[in-house]
Image (cartoon, grey):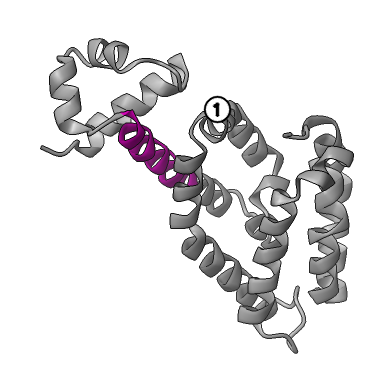
Amino acid sequence: MQANAFLIKKCLEILLTQGIRVSMDDIAKELSMSKRTLYELFENKNELIYNCISLFIETEKEKINSYLSNHNSNIIEELFPILNIEVYNRMKEHNYFFLDVKRHYPEIFEKVVVNHLGFFRSYISKTISKGMKQGFFRNDIEADIVSLFLFDLMTASKQNKELFSKYSISNVFKNTVLCYVQGISTPKGQQLMDDILKQSYHYFENEIKTVK
């Protein structure tokens, strides 16, 4: 027997409201089913959490893409949705959920991230190509090469524990990723980035906290 999307959604709602450490007994009670039936649907709690966080990521991607497409977002916000304050607040709302999964179920967290690497690489490449056509990024660059290095820069900086023990996430982002993007931007793109940072970056300086 396999769990359907509706049941996984209900389990996700339980995890979001009661926390990642809620027991399988309590989950079964919330679903009005026996614990035995729950284990017929999910081999163990790890499988349940994996399915829930996978669904959560897919749902949030759809929500963010929908918001950006319906609110006249610019190419920089599409490349870095977190620079949009509304998107950032949406992501921050359930940030504790990701942190708990990473803290208590690191193997599941890494597995989910790995499964979405292809999507994020492709998304960055398509966004870079779009920005080139719009005149925000230089037309003498290779979008695939640039996107691969940008993706590696973003993921590598997140994994550097020594770096984050000294500096905030926002400071690392500003001095690594944003510098790289400025290097591939046209004057038009650099002006757009400056405008966005003037409007919102001070907000993130106060909001973004270092995750140890």
Q: From the viewer's perspective, tell me whether residue 101 is left or right of residue 28.
A: right
Q: Is residue 131 visible?
A: no
> Percent x, y for residue 65?
51, 51
Q: Is residue 115 visible?
A: yes
Where is residue 88, by image quadrant?
A: top right
Q: Quadrant of the C terminus?
A: top right
> Percent x, y for residue 199?
84, 44
Q: From the viewer's perspective, tell me whether residue 33 is left or right of residue 181.
A: left
Residue beneath the point at 65% across and 72% down: 147
SS class, disc 1: helix
> Percent x, y for residue 152?
67, 65
> Percent x, y for residue 71?
60, 48
Extreme-left residue of the structure: 1
**Residue closest to the eye, 172 or 124:** 172
In reply to whether residue 86 is colored magenta, the answer given is no
Q: Which portion, as a residue range, is magenta?
A: 45-63
Mark 1 sits on what residue?
100
Q: Is residue 27 above or below residue 105?
A: above
**Residue closest to the eye, 54 or 190:** 54
Q: From the viewer's perspective, tell me whether residue 209 is left or right of residue 124.
A: right
Q: Quadrant of the N terminus?
A: top left
Where is residue 75, by image quadrant?
A: bottom right
Disc 1 residue type (three-letter): Asp
Q: Is residue 17 above or below residue 51?
A: above
**Crowdedness near tag 1: few (<14), some (14–19) or many (≥20) residues, C-alpha within 10 Å:** some
Residue beneath the point at 70% across and 58% down: 156
Is most of the magenta stretch helix, strand or loop? helix
